[in-house]
Image (cartoon, coloured by chain):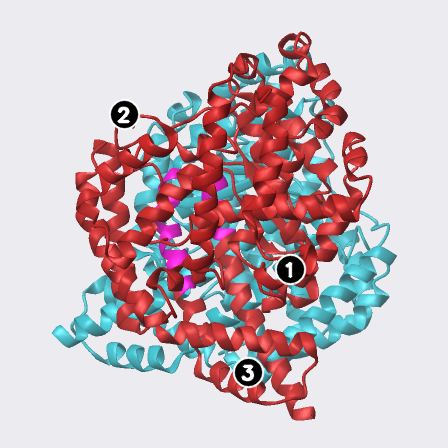
Chain colours: A red, B cyan
Amino acid sequence: MKNTNNAYNLYVQKMRKIADVRHSISVLNWDKEVNLPTKGSQARSRQVATLAGIAHEMSIDKELGGLLDTLYKGNHLDERQRRNIELSHEDYQKSTKYSTNFVIRLSETTSEAYHAWLKARQENDFAFFKEPLSALVDIKKEEAQLLGYKNHPYDALMDIFEPGANTADTDILFKDVREQLVDFVRRIREKPQVDDGFMRKFYPKDQQWKLGVDMLKKMGYDFEAGRQDISEHPFTTNFASSDVRVTTRIDENDFGNMLWSCIHEGGHALYEQGLPEEQYGLPLGNFLSLGIHESQSRLWENNVGRSLPYWKANYQQLQSIFPDNLNAVSLMDFYKAMNRVNPSFIRTESDELHYHFHILIRYEIEKGLIEGSLQSDDLRDIWNEKYKEYLNIDVPDDKRGILQDIHWSHGSFGYFPTYSMGSFYAAQLHKQAQKDIPDLIRQTEQGNHTDLLAWLRENIHQYGRFYTADELCKRITGEKLNFRYFMEYAEEKYSGIYGL
Amino acid sequence: MKNTNNAYNLYVQKMRKIADVRHSISVLNWDKEVNLPTKGSQARSRQVATLAGIAHEMSIDKELGGLLDTLYKGNHLDERQRRNIELSHEDYQKSTKYSTNFVIRLSETTSEAYHAWLKARQENDFAFFKEPLSALVDIKKEEAQLLGYKNHPYDALMDIFEPGANTADTDILFKDVREQLVDFVRRIREKPQVDDGFMRKFYPKDQQWKLGVDMLKKMGYDFEAGRQDISEHPFTTNFASSDVRVTTRIDENDFGNMLWSCIHEGGHALYEQGLPEEQYGLPLGNFLSLGIHESQSRLWENNVGRSLPYWKANYQQLQSIFPDNLNAVSLMDFYKAMNRVNPSFIRTESDELHYHFHILIRYEIEKGLIEGSLQSDDLRDIWNEKYKEYLNIDVPDDKRGILQDIHWSHGSFGYFPTYSMGSFYAAQLHKQAQKDIPDLIRQTEQGNHTDLLAWLRENIHQYGRFYTADELCKRITGEKLNFRYFMEYAEEKYSGIYGL
């Protein structure tokens, strides 16, 4: 027993040191996005690369492997300790599947693809990206073989971002999207469009900034355990649950830009601030999956932040900050504007509904590339055809088409589906929260989010990776992820807005 | 030849990785001073400690040691490569003198002393610090033995901060301070005092900030390779010569606070920005010594920034920014005010002349403690007596007396003398610059610092650690550090101001 305790403590020590290095990388990257002087970028890249190398070496360290084997076979651990060991053991097995040679080839192929993508964007021509992308797809196929899978090679890649996810389940989700959401959006687009012109009046930077900070505070974001800064692309990062930082950007002529991205990042940050501090560096101190992470941001951004009850609480304040822009706009018109449904070329600028067509298209393409039924040669045409089919728009060029996302250039295949899963989880969870907290909507109308946050903390945040996403979802809602909840949410909300 | 090249390249690789880790620590520490949310400090401390441990392990790595031995004995290196190897070899030998056991004991003793110092400051009572300080002195004596020295154990400790410095040379400097400066200051204090009341009028924060940034730009500080932020204590830090950051603080009711600290840190930063980028991670890419570093900050702060020529160039602008405070103040009165000589209890608030009495006192005490002629028991009385003797003031309490500096609580014995050396080097170097650039003073009067910066770059910055401080000083000025130049500078300047 004593030996097991010693071994477990040694394991904790080693894991925390790895976490220290990884979080240091996060500090360096945060600083890069927020503060870095232009000439400092080369040195910063090499510093990040060195730390990443050190973290990788530590995570495949043989002593750690031996320790994990011993602890995995032992039986003197409590439930949480056991789960940490299971997960770390699994992570370790995965890490050691990558040979040094493969890691170097992957890194080189990715680096080439990234630079080709930059070039292709600059030239607005997919042709520059085609071959490097093809090489990247080949090595990702190899990675899928190396990691192993039961049914479909794409499963192995999804699993990196969403442990346990697979094409069988995801096919069902996106079949529902195709069969239900496409038709629903078509019906909306037959209705008269709502007006959101007042969103693009002049909203001064300082006032937007203060408003964003205030919204974060009202959600329950702890500014003593984090801070907000400005960066080109908004993001959330964490160095510990006691230091979780968000960034935003402000466009003085597009009000929505800052506000909902602020609430979105706030949702991510609340998850990280709610992870158990005493599990720092261990699986149970880590977020569960990208889909669950995204469920937290989407729940706050959309199910709360784009709801009528939320704005019943906040609209008067908003009008008082921007009287010239908003005094003549009713609460209902403001609510409609923020939920305007309109197809866009760019995923990140999409409304809540069309968003899933963007993801669906990427999912179909990625799956096809990895299983070999699609080739990167034909990809621009396929992309553009799918945008015509699902969004009914003609992609004008590659920058607003197939070159818009950075993900593929980073070799992140299997990442996109987690965005949709996040929204679907959010709808399912928010529905359940309304059952468990009977006056949740009234509380939201009063600007009170205490119970909702406590519910998220209790049901999701505190567990880290203790449950799988499937288990967690079943535990909370009684069933696994089901598109039905998102569809019901969409029908209820948009029928009202568009008078269906 | 090929093998030596390979070995040298391998050495460079290893050194750069160590530098990457050390600079990452600097990023974490910079962020701690500038950005850290209150609850994040514990996690940050452990992250810094982990990286420090990794950097230490890398720097005593046996493979590196073997490589250095081989290269040190080899003879196919060019002059700069050879010097890098010599210095790295020396550094490595020193590092490996520290046993793990000693490092742990030193770290524990320091940590205890630091917390005792915090407590003692809080209670305003040296008694709380006495014993931990005594323990710290004992282990520093042990360190001196372990590092080795020729004549005096304190030499070994000075050498950590100022390679090559020793008590024999430093005794001469401070003998001059005692014999020449004490008497000179006494003569000043017999004269009527100059007025600096207008310095403590209200100077709005934003305008001070902009002024500071402007002064940095005019010195030649490259904002594309650095940035300025606010922190509690101003400091300069570098992550590469392409990313050198300064901080300042602003007191709206004490104008001088921001301005000269800004110029001071700017001087440090220009040195770091001027170090050769291609020598990143190697001794020749590193600053030479703390004394030389301080010479750069002091030269800009005092020899330039508190000179009449400098303000001939800048005073009109200053008056236009703060017309209410300064329009009625003549250039000469402003110049006198910034050079007001008045004893203070606190070293960091001292004028340019009394400053060296503060250092002299610390030097005498440190030397006494390390050689064993003084005991920490008697230290408060000794401190207070020396302040009476050299500054003619009665120390009112321990916070404004023996507890004011953080250095001892960190175990930094041998650090203080480098502050005085810095000022003395600054005077000697600035004198030489005036010889080498005949119209330097006229350039300064025109706000043109291009030639001065180029002179510093060429004579000092570009060399990193290539020369020793002694060699460098002789190379530039024809003789080693000599207090005479500071005394001449002081006599010329203050005779004018106080009409001696």
Which range of residues does the magenta coloring cover?
A: A27-52
Disc 3, SS: helix
Q: Chain of mark 2?
A: A
Report whether B51 appears left or right of A263: left
Residue A108 at least partly seen: yes
Q: Earlier in the sequence, mark 1 or mark 2?
A: 2
Residue A434's place in the image compared with B497, above or below, is: below
Seen at 54% across and 57% down, the residue is A289
Residue B198's place in the image compared with A429, above or below, is: above
Instruction: From the viewer's side, name the closer residue of B230 and A402.
Output: A402
Crowding near the residue tagged with mark 1, few <14, some 14–19, many ≥20 C-alpha atoms within 10 Å: few
Instruction: Residue A474: give its label.
Output: 1
Q: Chain of mark 3?
A: B
The answer for how far apart the CA atoms under marks 1 and 2 are is: 43 Å
Instruction: Residue B100: give its label.
Output: 3
Q: Main secondary structure of the magenta part?
A: helix
